[in-house]
Amino acid sequence: MTERPFARRLAAGLVPAVPYLWLGVFFLVPFLIVLKISLSDPAVAQPPYKPVFDWSDIAGFFSGLDLENFELLTQDDLYFRATLSSVRIAAISTALLLLVGFPIAYGMARAPERYRSLLVALVILPFWTSFLIRIYAWVAILKPEGLLTQALTGLGLISEPLDILNTETAVFIGIVYAYLPFMVLPLYATLEKMDDTLLEAALDLGSPPWRSFWTITVPLAMPGIIAGSLLCFIPAVGEFVIPDLLGGSETLMIGRQLWSEFFSNRDWPLASAVAILLLIILVVPIVIYRDVEARRLEARP
Amino acid sequence: MNRRLSLFNVTSLVIGFAFLYLPILLLVIYSFNASRLVTVWGGFSTQWYGALFRNQALMEAAWVTLRIALLSATLATVLGTLAALALTRYGRFPGRTLFTGMVYAPMVMPEVITGLSLLLFFVAIDLDRGFWTITLAHTTLTMCFVTVVVQSRLMTFDRSLEEAAMDLGAPPLRTFFSVTLPLIAPSIVAGFLLAFTLSMDDLVIASFNAGPGATTLPIKIYSQVRLGLSPEVNAASTILIGIVTLGVISATLLSKRSVLRKAH
């Protein structure tokens, strides 16, 4: 009889323990390893860094660590420019996403109720199809003799081929296209719950529509605006595929830099240092995002 | 209360959805192009589909990708469901803050960081890069998405059903399998599908963790795209889009039918 409650308690304890352990081993520990390797020296070997950990030599372990890679990051202004440019590109893209996403989410929230779940499904569907394929589709559209040039010359709007591919404009288009569902869905979720009587009351009291929009709709949609913006901004800063396929060689982004340090230069310690740098940039937005999400989930009735 | 669609609302919906769907539509149309030039229409043809199925390397990569996606999505569904239960049914257990942090961080973490850190971990524990390292990496990333999907369902459903079963003397495990699980089943299926497509789709994490023995379809497509557009990639993409569309539509219909059956 004493066995069963124990077995039951054990089973109950396993529910949080198993995923906890999994994330600890495959998320937290790898992270500490990145930190450690970013502090070690590169070596021409396989793997290409000096192992710096040895249980028998703890003192040697600590003396082997240095900030050399980080000094390199501060000396070469390439990384500084890449950081600035990533944040700038992600910020502009997020602003564009808000501009494009808000009217769509607003239209969805105003649509008759029976169409709304269909509209939500239509926004989600492209997200299910491959990210890589969706970016690839834009290469054919944006290239100089591509479909956009063909369409615009056909309409007689331009006479010279447009050269958008391999520019920053193409990167903006790619990010807005790929991340649009992430912006529209949180916005829609807040706009749909909005109480229309507030707008009607404002109208009755003589407020012009644009003023009601700024003083009622926007403040009420703020949780969605914050969640959507973070959900787009954070991954966009570290984006690799979009700048690599649509951007030119002058489009500097930190995710791309990490990729080339790792794959082309095979400098794993420096790649790790770049990863830590990227993380430091993102730590504040990630913490805010986590709080916003946790509060949103826990506040539900 | 009447909500009316203004002209502005309709226009923004039409333009928005055209923007979302036109590129995919063009890709599908041009996969039936007879010309080798991807952007010049040369008549209807299905020749690239034939060429695709004769491309041994691409087919092999597709098979590896499918196996990894099935296995990692299954593991992620189990782990994610457990994590969702832990977050909704266990109150404040020790280390809960760290746990929620570890669940939310991988979802927004740039893929280059996740890919690099897992690779360095696998090198440190001396695990050969290949099928298993990609599977473990995908499981870790996708279980977080499953957690959020299942968690939001667990939070909205009526707890009194569980309490009633317990009051009638059902042990916790039995309550879980005969009351909770059937109620959250649609969200578990949705979580599995999400994990599956995320794994099928991933380029960055797979590139870091792939070995000589295992190349996935996105890695193959990416290396072909870097060499230039190819009609074969269009054909492969169209098939993938078709599979995903069918999957999403059937999942929607399935969950609709189960809702209807319950209503009767």
Image: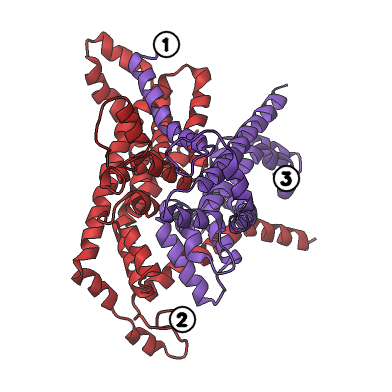
Chain colours: A red, B purple
Task: Tell which circle, 3 or 1, labels the residue nearer the N-terminal end.
Answer: 1
Distance, label 3 to label 2, CA atoms, is 49 Å
Please say if the residues under marks 3 and 2 sit with CB atoms less than 8 Å apart.
no
Left or right relative to A114: residue B163 = right
Distance, label 1 to label 2, CA atoms, is 68 Å
**Residue position for label 1:** B2
Mark 3: give few (<14), some (14-19) or many (20+) Cα within 10 Å: few
**Residue position for label 3:** B177
Mark 2: give few (<14), some (14-19) or many (20+) Cα within 10 Å: few
Residue B253 screen position, x and y as percent: 65, 30
Residue for point 33% across, 86% down: A63
Residue for point 33% across, 27% down: A154
Q: Which label is found at residue A46?
A: 2
Badge 1 sits on which subunit? B
Query: Can I make out residue B157 in this image?
Result: yes
Closer to viewer: mark 3 or mark 2: 2
Mark 1 and mark 2, same subunit?
A: no
The kind of residue tagged 3 is Phe
Mark 3 and mark 2, same subunit?
A: no
The kind of residue tagged 2 is Gln
For numbered disc 1, what is the local secondary structure?
Answer: loop
Left or right relative to A232: residue B59 = right
Residue B29 screen position, x and y as percent: 51, 34
Mark 1: give few (<14), some (14-19) or many (20+) Cα within 10 Å: few
Query: Can I make out residue A222 in this image?
Result: no
Badge 2 sits on which subunit? A
Left or right relative to B147: residue A79 = left
For numbered disc 3, what is the local secondary structure?
Answer: helix
